[in-house]
Amino acid sequence: MTATVAESPFEEEEKRDGEGGGAAAPPDPFDRDVLPAPKGASRRLLGSLLRPHRARVAVAAVLLLLQQAAVQAGPLLVAYAIDRAVPALRAGDHGPLTAVAAGYALCALSSGGLQYAFVRAAARINQSVLLELRGRIHRHGQALSVDFHDRYTSGRLISRSTTDVEALRELLDEGLQELLGVTLSVVYICATLFWLDIGLGGAALLSFVPLFLLVQNFRRRSMRVYRKRSTAIATVIVKFVETMNGIRPVQAFRRERSGDAEFGELNDRHLKVNGDSILEMARYVVSSRLVANIAVAVIVLWSAQRVATGSLELGVLAAAALYLRRLYDPIDRLGMFLNSYQSAAASLEKIAGLLAQVPSVPEPVRPRPLPERSADMPGRPVVFEGVSFAYRTGGEVLPRFDLEIPAGQTVAVVGATGAGKSTLAKLLARFYDPTEGRVLLDGTDLRDLATPELRRGVVMVTQEAFLFSGTVAENIAIGRPDASREEIERAAKAIGAHDFITALPDGYDTDVRKRGGRISAGQRQLVAFARALLADPAVLILDEATSSLDVPGERAVQQAMDTVLRGRTAMVIAHRLSTVEIADRVLVMDAGRIVEDGRPADLIAGTGRFAGLHRAWRDSLA
Ligand SMILES: Nc1ncnc2c1ncn2[C@@H]1O[C@H](COP(=O)(O)OP(=O)(O)OP(=O)(O)O)[C@@H](O)[C@H]1O
Ligand SMILES: [Mg+2]
C-alpha cells in the first residue's frame, strides 16, 4: 500500500485547532484523527495481517489466474470458429465447430466453478484478517495507558474499529478481487491481442496512455477528498458518542437544541465531502468511458480497413472487438476500486497510527517480584522518592516531594478542589509514571512490577464505581476472578452490601444492566467496596469512594471502611471530615504541595488549615 502521509490533508482541522486552543498551547496531535506513525506503518500492518495466510493467498491467486484464463478464452474460440471452423463446416467437416462449442461450454463452466472457489478462499482470508485487526485494536486500546485515553476520545476508538475496519473490509471483499481481476484480464487480453496481431496489441497498449493519465489524476484528487471524508465521518461519530455518553448533563442543561445544531453542522460537512467524492467519481467515469469508446471506434475502423485489404482475418477482427469491450469495460470499475482503495488506505493509516502508539506506562522488561506478605500485616509500605509530576497536556501539577507511608497506615488526603489529591492517588496506582523520581511499593519501584502483581498490590476505588455488564456477583468477582460464591458473599456481608443485594430481583445473579437490576450510586459504591475487599490488596486507595453513601447510614459506612481498611496501607481522599477521623494521619494538600502532615488530633489542636476546616465542619453540624 502506498498510503504515505500527505503534507496536510486536514487544513480545516488545523485552522480550527489554531483558533481554539489559545495562543500559547501547541495543538495536541491527539486532537487529529491520524496519529503520527513511522513511515510505511500501514504497509507493514497489512503485511503482518496477511503473512499468516500466505498459503491461502497463494491458492487464491492460482484460482484467479485459472479463472481469468477460462474467461478470456471465449473470444479466441470465436475467432477460431469464424476463421477455421466455419470454412471447415462448409467443406463438410463438423469436427472443429463441435470442438469450439465444447470448448466454450467447458470454459464457461470451469470459470464459474473457479470463481466460486476463489470467492470462498478470499472470503476466508478476509474474515480472519478483519477479525485479527479488530482484536488488535481492542487489545491495543486496552493496553494503552490512561494518559492516552485522556487525550484520544472513545468515539475515535470506536470509529477506528467500526468505519475504518469496514473500509478495509470493503477493499478486501470487493476492491482487491476487482483489481486483481482487472489487472489479470488486461494482461491476458493484451497478450492475446499481441499474439493475434502485433498491430492490434500495440494499438491497445497505446490507448492505455490517456486512460492511465486519467486514472492518475483521479487518484490524486480523490485521495484528498477521501481523507477528508473519513475524517468527517469520524467527527460525526465522536460527537454522537460524546452526546450519548453525556446524555444526563445534556438533558439536565437542555443542551439538546445546541447539540443538535452542532451535530447538524458536522453532519452537513460530512454530506458535503461525500458529495465531493461522488462528483469526482462521476467526472472520472464519464471521461474514462469517452476515451474508451473513442479507442474502440478508432481500432475497429482501422482493423476493418485491414480486413478489407486482406491483411487481417475477419475472425481476428471479431475477437479484437470482443476483447476491446472487455478491456475497457472494467475501467469504470477500476475507479470504483480506487475509491475503496483510497478510503481503505486512509483508514489503514489511522489504524496503523493508533497501533503504533506505545503505552506511556510500559510493562517492565524484567519484572521483579514483591517480597512475601506476612500474615499479621497485610499492608505494605509505600515511599514517594523525589517525585514530581506533570500531565502531558499541562504544566507541573505536583512539584518535587518525598512521602513515606508505613505499612498498615491509613492516610487521609484533604485539600481544595484541584489541589492534586487524585493525581497523587493515580501515581500510587501507576495510572501514570512520575515525571521525576520513583514510587516504591515495599521497596520495589512500581515500574518494575508486572501488571498482575501491581493490581494485586494496589487497588483504587473511585467515585464512579463503574459496573460492567453482567451480574452483581460477577462484578464483585472482578476483584478476584477465581473467588468462590461463598467468598463473594462473605465480602459483600463484611461491607454491609449483602442485604440490598439479596433484595434485588435475582439477588447476586441480578444483571446490573437489565430492568430491575438498576442499582443506586451508593449501592454501586458498596459493590465496588466488596470488589476491593475481595481483591485483598496490600494498598487500598479510596478516591471519594464514599461520597454517594448516605449520611444516616454513616455508621454503616464507617464499619464498611473499618473492614476494608483493616491492616492495609490506605490512602483515603474524602471531603467528609468524619471519614478523615478514622485515619492515622492527615495530609493537607494545596496547589500540589503537602502543606500539613500529622495525626488528626494534633492537627485539629493546632492552628493550621486542617484545624480551620475542622472547626468550620463542626460548626456546620451544630
Ligand atoms: N488528565 C489530566 N490532564 C491534565 N491535567 C489534569 C488531568 N487531571 C487533572 N489535571 C489537573 O491537575 C490538577 C490536580 O487535579 P486533581 O484531579 O489531582 O485534583 P483533586 O485534588 O483530586 O481535585 P478534586 O477534589 O476536585 O477531585 C488540576 O489542576 C487539574 O486541572
Ligand atoms: Mg479528585
Image (cartoon, rainbow, N blue to C red):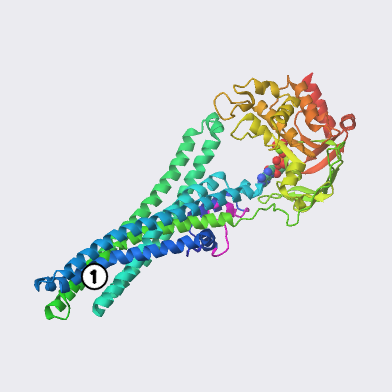
Q: Is residue 130 left or right of residue 145?
A: left
Q: Amino acid at mark 1?
A: Leu
Dividing the image into 4 quarters, which one contains the C terminus? top right
Q: Is residue 45 left or right of residue 124?
A: right
What SS does tag 1 mark? helix
- Which x, y percent locates residue 145? 66, 49
- Which x, y percent locates residue 50? 50, 60
Please tell me whether residue 194 belongs to the stretch shown in magenta.
no
Q: Residue at x 18, y 66 (%)?
A: 98
Secondary structure mostly seen in magenta is: loop
Q: Is residue 477 left or right of residue 514?
A: right
Please tell me whether residue 31 belongs to the stretch shown in magenta.
yes
As displayed, is residue 393 above or below residue 467? below
375 vs 407, nearest the viewer = 375
| Magenta-colored span | 24-40
490 vs 385, nearest the viewer = 490
Q: Residue at x 71, y 28 (%)?
A: 486
User: What residue is shown with label 1?
Assistant: 76
As displayed, is residue 265 above or below residue 334? above
Dividing the picture into quadrants, the one containing residue 475 is: top right
Q: Residue at x 51, y 44 (%)?
A: 238
As displayed, is residue 450 above or below residue 617? below
Q: Is residue 280 visible?
A: no
